[in-house]
Image: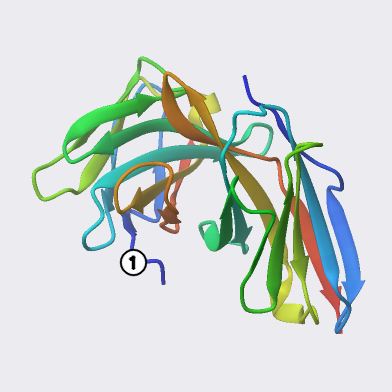
Amino acid sequence: GESVGLHLPTLSVQEGDNSIINCAYSNSASDYFIWYKQESGKGPQFIIDIRSNMDKRQGQRVTVLLNKTVKHLSLQIAATQPGDSAVYFCAVLVHSGYSTLTFGKGTMLLVSP
Amino acid sequence: DSGVTQTPKHLITATGQRVTLRCSPRSGDLSVYWYQQSLDQGLQFLIQYYNGEERAKGNILERFSAQQFPDLHSELNLSSLELGDSALYFCASSVEDSNQPQHFGDGTRLSIL
């Protein structure tokens, strides 16, 4: 089966810093990856996705990098703001008969003013 | 606001009881997914319906069942409840299948006393 790991359970940064959240996956056949943000009392919120035919994708203040060689995914948040404080999950599409998303355990991002 | 609506927000019941959780997907989305989130297991995929038909099954107990109705709303039925079923239950929807972004509702918090 797929295992999805996060390199750090908690990441503390200062407002204005850039944040990098990492994720490792195990199945080289995985071809679709999503980052979610979950605030307290809310459901996971879609941030950005990337398919395996790309190495990098940019959104508003966020960039996702995919390294298929080492099966690693990262989310970069530029100029981190207090409102970015949340738990961030990577999700990986796993194909085993049918296709389902497997979620990592999450990294809590704490942004200090 | 993701456009996915879940009711009720909170549910408190006793062991052995049965509950029904309801989900209305985003307008136009054909797939509905159910997830369970607990502190020790993280976000676990339960089941997916696509246009009224079961598409994929994950770690769903036999005591749990779901269905998707012709208007595309979905219900998750949990029966013979046990203390360990206490968790957050999320519904997500996507336009078609799981290789597209899933958008989550804010969940139902189920507490078993």
Q: Quadrant of the N terminus of chain A?
A: top right
Question: In this orientation, does residue A1 appear?
Answer: yes
Residue B21: image quadrant is top left
Is residue B50 found left or right of A4 in the rendered image? left
- Residue designated by label 1: B3
Seen in the picture, residue B15 relative to B76 is either above or below; the reply is above
Residue B19: image quadrant is top left
Residue A22 rendering spot, x and y as whole percentages = 80, 50
Residue A57 rendering spot, x and y as whole percentages = 64, 64
What residue is at 39 percent from the left and 39 percent from the top? B34
Seen in the picture, residue B55 relative to B26 is either above or below; the reply is above
Is residue A50 found left or right of A68 in the rendered image? left
Report in which chain the residue with disc 1 lies. Answer: B
Residue ranking furthest to the front: A53
Residue A55 rendering spot, x and y as whole percentages = 69, 54
Residue A111 rendering spot, x and y as whole percentages = 83, 74
* Amino acid type for the residue under numbered disc 1: Gly
Seen in the picture, residue B100 relative to A16 is either above or below; the reply is above
The one of A55 and B36 positioned closer to us in this rendering: A55
Is residue B105 found left or right of B32 in the rendered image? right
What residue is at 87 percent from the left and 48 percent from the top? A8
The one of A95 and A14 positioned closer to us in this rendering: A95
Q: Quadrant of the C terminus of chain A?
A: bottom right
What residue is at 80 percent from the left and 82 percent from the top? A79
Question: In this orientation, does residue B113 appear?
Answer: no
